[in-house]
Image (tube, rainbow, N blue to C red):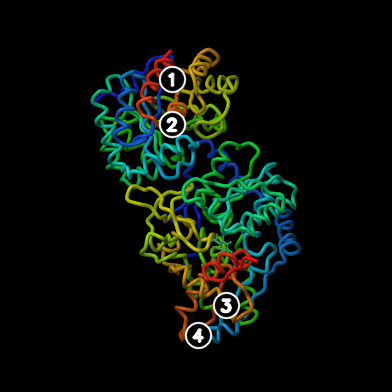
């Protein structure tokens, strides 16, 4: 059996990935890659990061046996990897801590980031507050509207929010603007990308920082079940929480892996964010990967009720895992996700974010009355507080006082 | 093989004008390019509109958006360039675009369509590290791949990038996106000088050149062989409240002015 070893030294996952950026950014990315390689061998860095994981984030996150939900599905035993219990309420903080430590080591004095749901923005603003660095968050004006609680959180944490009015006014456009900021301020600025997307070395670096999720889950499940899980399930936006859970299991060929994308109003409609179901290979944000585009290569606008999944691209490693058939990808609609959001809240007493609600919806649909005696780990990568207004509106509940 | 106009660029005071294809509409775009062409500038750069122009500032972004709002296709842009090439004379035609546009059209098909029409191409997001395949096909068809050099490119890297390079060197005057920044003549001069030691082809300075004054200063205070003007040309359309007739008149005045 061949062990999985991706990406190549130039950032290729099979044919996907790479560095497609202008010459202003190229020297920076090469330098970032070099610095990242260096700190990977640095014991002090590792210790510092582990210490922050433990005492600041509250890691390891627990592995909860969702008994009621399992009973309801009448299928496999379902475990939640509870990264929604992390400080700031999602998995995003794992990556931000890794990157800001790197930024510090590289002597950078100004931090920028893009955000969709606001979770990555909040996590970035949080680590900037902790390390005393100025923080600028690019956020589409449509997302500012639908993720208000997180906008206020970022402001409280001292970040400056820069509304983005171009394009679809959501995550894709926020990333364009953050990249433009970086091109302008190359000398002092570190760009903390929030997912396994963008040019090399980001997809690798973010995966590595997030893989603490899968490493813990592996140990935890071996302890309680005395065996590896039969299935892993996670939602995929840019793909960071999914890669974090999947990566440490990729060589375990018996573990079946499922990624769930947001299909919006349906994967066959124009209003979708299911990149790997409905897209074709192309270049977006410096990386070659599946992308929603027209026949001329113009990037289409994505649609999802979940701001964190509302992205027309996907991390290149997922494209590779899809093509080598190591991971299977499916789409779940807004409606199905909303139902799962409510069911999980009632059954388990856990209000999930709309992003993992997509993974939950797939589980409830595809595993119903099936796969008994099997064990599933689902990445509960974020909590639903940020989505209360969006969900209330969609369900028809008047949440204004 | 047909001649490549870029190989006979003048030695000094080269003027390159950038304009987005299909902006603001396809038929008006034709008028704009005809006006530009009537001045016989040394180079015209044709921007192919892209939905996500990462390295472009708000003005060119807006131009792209307007062009795409009437569903302009890559084929239509290429047809426009082909038609204009009938009256190109000594002007070099250069395409400036993003890689996804070329890949989606099909690299071979794209190169075939612009062969003997276009002299050079700038693919903004195709770095040296990824270029080898495309560069080979281009060179077989006598189209020069124009290299961008930024203030962040160090000497060693610049040397690597410029090896065997043809046409001209596009020196990005400052870190930033198109249409931004103030010009730092000292830094420009220093870097241009160093580039000229590495390569015999002309060095043009682009990004942030807005007026006749800027053009004169570049020529006076630096060693550059010419300038590239883009955003400033497009900006005027918005300044004139999108009145195409007024814009065409203004464009004539502006180009006459900067053709020093
Ligand atoms: C809770 C949560 N899950 C998932 C995502 C999607 O990102 P990724 O696919 O990188 O995990 C987001 C993005 O904001 C998020 O906030």
* Residue A318 percent location from the top left of the image: 47, 61
Determine the secondary structure under disc 3: helix
Q: Nearer the viewer, mark 3 or mark 2?
A: 2
Q: Which residue is mark 1?
A: B200
Q: Are marks 3 and 2 on the same chain?
A: no
Mark 1 and mark 3 on one chain:
no
Determine whether B241 is above or below A195 in the image. above
Q: Is residue A252 visible?
A: yes
Examine the image and state in which quarter residue B44 appears.
top left
Q: Secondary structure at mark 2?
A: loop
Q: Chain of mark 3?
A: A
Q: How dense is the environment of label 3, judged by Cα within 10 Å: few (below 14), some, or many (20 and up)?
A: many
Does residue A83 appear to the left or right of A129 in the view shown?
left
Q: Position of residue B115 (x, y in %)?
A: 26, 33
Question: Could you tell whether A352 is left or right of B8 in the image?
Answer: right
Query: Helix, strand, or loop for circle 4?
Result: loop
Q: Nearer the viewer, mark 1 or mark 3?
A: 3
Asked if the residues shown at circle 1 and circle 3 are in contact, with their CB atoms under 8 angstroms apart, the answer is no
Vertical arrangement, residue B190 with respect to residue B64, above or below: above
User: On the rendered structure, is B139 left or right of A247?
Assistant: left
Which residue corresponds to mark 4? A75
Question: What is the CA distance from the residue labelled 4 to the residue labelled 1?
Answer: 72 Å
Instruction: Check residue A344 in the rendering and tell me which mark sits there, or answer none.
Output: 3
Q: Is mark 1 within 8 Å of ligand 1?
A: no
Depth check: give the residue in front, A12 or A370.
A370
Q: Earlier in the sequence, mark 3 or mark 4?
A: 4
Chain name for mark 4: A
Residue tagged 2: B241
């Amino acid at each position: 059996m061949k062990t999985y070893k991706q990406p190549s030294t130039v950032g290729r996952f099979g044919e996907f990935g790479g560095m497609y950026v202008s010459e202003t950014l190229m020297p920076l990315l090469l330098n970032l890659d070099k610095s990242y390689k260096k700190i990977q061998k640095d014991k002090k860095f590792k210790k510092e990061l582990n210490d922050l994981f433990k005492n600041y984030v509250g890691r390891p996150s627990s592995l909860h046996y969702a008994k009621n939900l399992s009973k309801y599905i009448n299928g496999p035993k379902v475990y939640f990897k509870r990264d929604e219990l992390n400080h700031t309420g999602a998995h995003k903080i794992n990556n931000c801590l890794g990157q800001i430590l790197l930024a510090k080591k590289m002597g950078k004095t100004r931090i920028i980031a893009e955000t969709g749901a606001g979770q990555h923005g909040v996590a970035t603003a949080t680590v900037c507050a902790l390390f005393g660095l100025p923080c600028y968050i690019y956020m589409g004006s449509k997302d500012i509207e639908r993720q208000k609680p997180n906008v206020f959180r970022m402001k409280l944490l001292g970040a400056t929010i820069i509304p983005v009015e171009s394009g679809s006014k959501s995550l894709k456009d926020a990333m364009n603007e953050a990249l433009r900021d970086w091109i302008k301020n190359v000398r002092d600025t570190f760009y903390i990308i929030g997912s396994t997307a963008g040019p090399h070395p980001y997809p690798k670096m973010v995966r590595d920082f997030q893989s603490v999720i899968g490493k813990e889950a592996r140990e935890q499940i071996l302890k309680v079940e005395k065996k590896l899980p039969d299935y892993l399930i996670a939602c995929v936006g840019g793909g960071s929480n999914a890669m974090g859970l999947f990566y440490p299991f990729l060589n375990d060929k018996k573990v079946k892996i499922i990624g769930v994308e947001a299909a919006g109003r349906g994967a066959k409609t124009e209003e979708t964010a299911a990149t790997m179901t409905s897209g074709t290979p192309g270049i977006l944000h410096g990386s070659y990967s599946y992308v929603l585009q027209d026949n001329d290569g113009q990037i289409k606008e994505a649609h999802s009720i979940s701001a964190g999944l509302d992205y027309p691209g996907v991390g290149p490693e997922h494209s590779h895992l899809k093509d080598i058939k190591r991971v299977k990808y499916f789409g779940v609609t807004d409606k199905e996700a909303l139902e799962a959001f409510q069911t999980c809240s009632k059954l388990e007493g856990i209000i999930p974010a709309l992003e993992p609600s997509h993974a939950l919806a797939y589980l409830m649909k595809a595993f119903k009355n099936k796969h008994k005696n099997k064990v599933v780990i689902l990445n509960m990568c974020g909590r639903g507080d940020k989505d209360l207004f969006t969900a209330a509106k969609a369900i028809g509940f008047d949440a204004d006082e | 093989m047909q001649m490549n106009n870029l190989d006979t660029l003048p030695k000094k005071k080269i003027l390159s004008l950038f304009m987005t294809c299909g902006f603001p509409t396809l038929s008006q775009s034709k008028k704009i390019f005809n006006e530009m062409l009537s001045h016989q500038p040394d180079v015209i750069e044709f921007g192919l509109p892209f939905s996500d122009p990462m390295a472009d500032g708000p003005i060119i972004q807006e131009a792209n958006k307007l062009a795409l709002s009437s569903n302009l296709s890559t084929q239509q842009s290429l047809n426009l360039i082909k038609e204009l090439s009938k009256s190109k004379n000594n002007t070099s035609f250069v395409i400036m675009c993003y890689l996804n546009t070329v890949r989606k059209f099909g690299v071979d098909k794209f190169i075939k369509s612009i062969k003997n029409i276009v002299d050079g191409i700038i693919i903004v997001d195709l770095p040296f590290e990824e270029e080898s395949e495309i560069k080979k096909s281009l060179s077989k068809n006598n189209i020069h791949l124009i290299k961008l050099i930024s203030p962040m490119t160090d000497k060693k890297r610049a040397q690597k990038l410029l090896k065997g390079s043809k046409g001209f060197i596009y020196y990005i005057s400052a870190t930033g996106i198109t249409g931004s920044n103030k010009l730092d003549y000292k830094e420009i001069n220093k870097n241009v000088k160093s580039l000229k030691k590495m390569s015999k082809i002309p060095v043009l300075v682009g990004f942030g050149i807005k007026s006749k004054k800027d053009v004169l200063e570049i020529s006076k205070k630096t060693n550059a062989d010419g300038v590239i003007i883009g955003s400033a040309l497009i900006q005027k359309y918005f300044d004139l409240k999108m009145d195409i007739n007024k814009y065409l008149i203004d464009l004539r005045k502006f180009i006459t002015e900067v053709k020093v």
